Every structure is written in C-alpha cells, then in structure tokens.
Image (cartoon, rainbow, N blue to C red):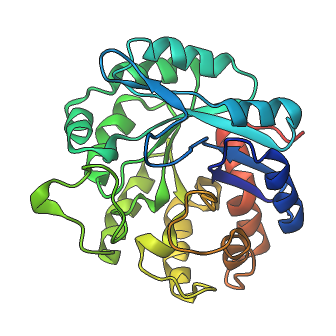
Amino acid sequence: MEIVDSQIHFGPGGIEKTLAAMDALGISAVLADEFWGLDNWGPGYTLPNGAYRVTSPTAELAAWLHPDRFAYVLRIDRLDPEAQSLVRMAKDAPHCRAIRMLPALTAVELEAFASGAYDPVFALAERIGLPVFLFIAGHMALMPRYLERFPRLQFIVDHCGMPIEANVSFLDAAKPDQQHSGPDVAYFDEVLKLAVHPNVALKWSHAQGMFGMRDYPSLGLRPYLRRAIDAFGARRVMWASDHGGNQTGETWGELVHYVRDNPELSGDEKAWLMGGTVRAVLGWKKG
C-alpha cells in the first residue's frame, strides 16, 4: 500500500530531513503547503491593497529535486489583483497540484465567501481543471452554493470540515460573540451532508483536535472515520497528517499509524485513504 500525505507544512529548508522522515515512515510522497508560521503566514509578501501573495520556495525546490516525492499547493488570496494570473500559473507549474483558499480565517472573508465573492477564482479553476482545497472549518452551510454553481470543479474540504479546535486561534475567524469553546462532535452531521455533491472530497486531518480525542491510537475517532467513509466513499476521503502544522502534539508516525493500523478498515479502504484518493482526485500520477 502506497502512503501519500495530502498535507504537510515545511520550510525554509528541511528537504533532506523531511525525506529521511518519509523514508522511515514508509511515506512515498507528500503534498506540501509551504508555511513558516502564524506570525506572517509566509513565505510571501503583502501587496499595496493589503492582499498577501504566498510564495513556495522550499516546496518548489523540493519538487524539482525530487519530483516523485514532493508536490505542492499554492495558497491564493482572492484580493490579489493578479489572483487569476496566479491560478493560471499554478495550473501550468509542473509540480503544483491544486490551489488552496482559506475563507474561514477571518470573519470578513467568511462574509465574502457567503456573498459569492469567490466566484471569479472558482470559475477560472473550473474552466482550466484545477482542484481547490478549502479551509472552511465549521461553515458547511456555505458550501452547497459553490458546489452546485461549479459542478465540474473538484473541491476538497480541509480538516474534516469541523469547527476549529479549542484553544487554537486563527486570526479573527470567530466573531467576539462566537468564540469557540471546544469540539462539537455533533457538527459532523453537517459535514456528512456534503457527500450528496459528487464534486467534493474530504481531507481527514486534524481529527484529534477537531473531535477532541487525543488519546493515541485515537480509538474514539474510528466511528467518525467510518461515518465519513460510509457517506463519501473511501475514494473521496484522503488522509493527511498536517505534519509541521499539527497543534495537538502527535508525532508524524502516530498520525500515520492511527489510520494505517486501524483494524476496522479494509485493505482497500486503507489504500484509498492513505494515498489512492489524493492521487485520483488531483490527477497526480505516481512517478
């Protein structure tokens, strides 16, 4: 069974160290979202209009040096005056597999997302066939409009689609009267409703924090993973460690093994979850 991690963060540097860890864990390839920390959300730079343009120097170098082991996503700020040009460039870049947008980071962007402000970027991504990862944590009611308006665009919902875990701050994603107080496992019912839309897949990541179950090997998460598979099908659920961005303390190895060693999953289900889905959904051929 091939293991492909559908999200890690790393950089600056660290390519050889990451490769060594991948080899030790039996990970064939990783999809990187280069991220240097919450202080500036970089690497990148702020434009005169306040938009932030992300760059991916480490991820691009890693993919050029080891094209069979690394690929990457490019984060796009819809307010970037060159957003559409950047989407086209992402499509043309040989090792970029998708774009990633994060409307759930701020209350302002959530309101923009709800109003349809992401239509221009999604329309172009649909036209050129470039998948879109979305961080839209805890706001699944805003998704169907886009899923129906852009039926040929492949969306991937980040981090189980769940509300942001307790005691983790992502800018002002919650309004002052809506502060997150901790996991809301009942909300998963709202996530599963998205399964009726064939153009959406679910990234199974940050589950320990989102469901409030940090007891490795995370036995309490198994029923929720089973529900995700039953709703979406294993071919629309992809595992990710978010190594480099995981805030609940599990090692990369623990994040691999709690799924790979789950006896309640069939061999076929594991093969899709642990690598088959991300390759199929992104059109990312092996080797």
User: In the image, is residue 14 above or below residue 255?
Assistant: above
Residue in the image at 53% along x and 19% along y:
87
Across and down, in percent, residue 103 comes to: 34, 40
In the image, is 1 to the left or to the right of 219? Answer: right
Front residue of 172/184: it is: 172
Residue in the image at 57% along x and 84% along y:
218
Q: Say which quarter of the image contains residue 21.
A: bottom right
Across and down, in percent, residue 276 comes to: 74, 53
Q: Quadrant of the N terminus?
A: bottom right
In the image, is 272 to the left or to the right of 39? Answer: right
Across and down, in percent, residue 283 comes to: 71, 36
Q: Say which quarter of the image contains residue 46.
A: top left
Across and down, in percent, residue 61 comes to: 78, 31
Q: Is residue 2 visible?
A: no
Q: Quadrant of the C terminus?
A: top right
User: In the image, is residue 280 above or below residue 113?
Assistant: below
